[in-house]
Image (cartoon, rainbow, N blue to C red):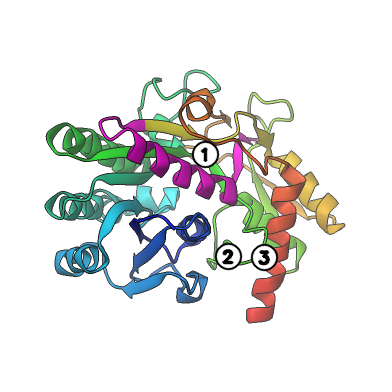
Amino acid sequence: MHDMTVLVTGGAGYIGSHAVLALLDAGYRVVVVDNLTTGFDWLVDPRATLVQGDIEDDDLVRGTIRDHGVGAIMHFAGSIIVPESVSDPLKYYRNNTVASRAVLESAVVCGVKHFIFSSTAATYGTPEKVPVAEGDPTIPINPYGTSKLMTEAMLRDVAAAHPINYCALRYFNVAGADPQQRSGQSTVGATHLIKIAVEAALGKRAGVGVYGTDYDTPDGTGVRDYIHVSDLAAAHVAALAVLIAEPGRSHTLNAGYGRGFSVLEVLDAVDRVTNIKLDRKIEGRRAGDAGELIADNSAILATLDWTPQRADLDGIVADAVAWERKLSERQ
């Protein structure tokens, strides 16, 4: 048992709920603050304490930190749909940048020493080279990426001024579900390719849109670095260990596997795992989609005690399928 309680904001969401599981399995005490706008209370492991409320409610957050003796914060709460960020930028600057500022201030006021932040590969925009490394230019091409990059800047400045260190993890494409089926991607109308494809395979939607077949990639479709959500959650626990061990140092790290799969390769994997031929609807490119986005993950491998355990595409898809079947039983 670690003598530390970790506050997980957004812990009732997809990635947050897996981080809660990983923390609990590693022996940490966990308290979750989530307003349940996109999260689900039943995704939060019963070993954790769930506080329903808003992360911008300073009294609630600070009371929770003090009541539970919180020593570290993992901040997942936020909005994540890129096209929506383009049509409603102020929502993203409020839910991501402004809300993160509030949580950071609560951390500083309450003397929390460690902060782990969900950042994104969208901070890079359209990278000049692939794979993309942490030191490469960060020129976001949508408000979602900008809202997260602004939070990274706040973290850097706060860590320079106060006794707090941080790790910002820039996620690539998160997929799959807890192999023990304790959590998974549960949002209705999800925008993740593997989730959409699995829903289609199980008859929950008509087919799968393939947006753009003329990219400069081996088969013309977009290539992405898919990381299993349980590996990503494990990276957060490993990041916390490093922050505790080296209090003066902060880190910004890509969270990916360093290899990509195309849209068609992903759909082929879903076909294989489910033994169903997906109906593929070829559409034009979507605005703002890069042809290829792959992580240079050498820094995270060198910095954290972490190695991918679930990098097999068919395995990622199989976990997603098993969770989707479980969701069907709930509904």
Q: Earlier in the sequence, mark 3 or mark 1?
A: 1
Asked if labels 2 and 3 touch by Cβ distance under 8 angstroms, the answer is yes
> What label sits on residue 323 in the rendered view?
3
> What label sits on residue 172 in the rendered view?
1
Give the mark toward the camera: 2 or 1.
2
Above or below residue 227? Residue 69 is below
Answer few, some or many: residues within 10 Å of disc 1's Cα (few below 14, many 20 plus, some between 14 and 19): many
Answer few, some or many: residues within 10 Å of disc 2's Cα (few below 14, many 20 plus, some between 14 and 19): many
> Type of residue at label 2?
Ser
Q: Which residue appears at 30% of the width and 51% of the height?
A: 72
**Which residue lies most toward the right here?**
275
Percent position of residue 296, x then y? 53, 24
For the record, the magenta segment spans 222-251
Q: CA distance from mark 3 to mark 1?
A: 21 Å
Q: Which residue appears at 59% of the width and 42% of the height?
A: 227
Which residue carries the number 2 mark?
183
Percent position of residue 75, x then y? 34, 52
Asked if labels 1 and 3 touch by Cβ distance under 8 angstroms, the answer is no
Q: Earlier in the sequence, mark 3 or mark 2?
A: 2
In this view, the residue in front, 1 or 176, is: 1
Above or below residue 331? Residue 134 is above
In which quadrant of the rendered view does residue 146 lie? top left
Residue 90 visible to the viewer: yes
| 170 relative position to 312: left or right | left
**Kind of element beneath mark 3:** helix
Answer few, some or many: residues within 10 Å of disc 3's Cα (few below 14, many 20 plus, some between 14 and 19): many
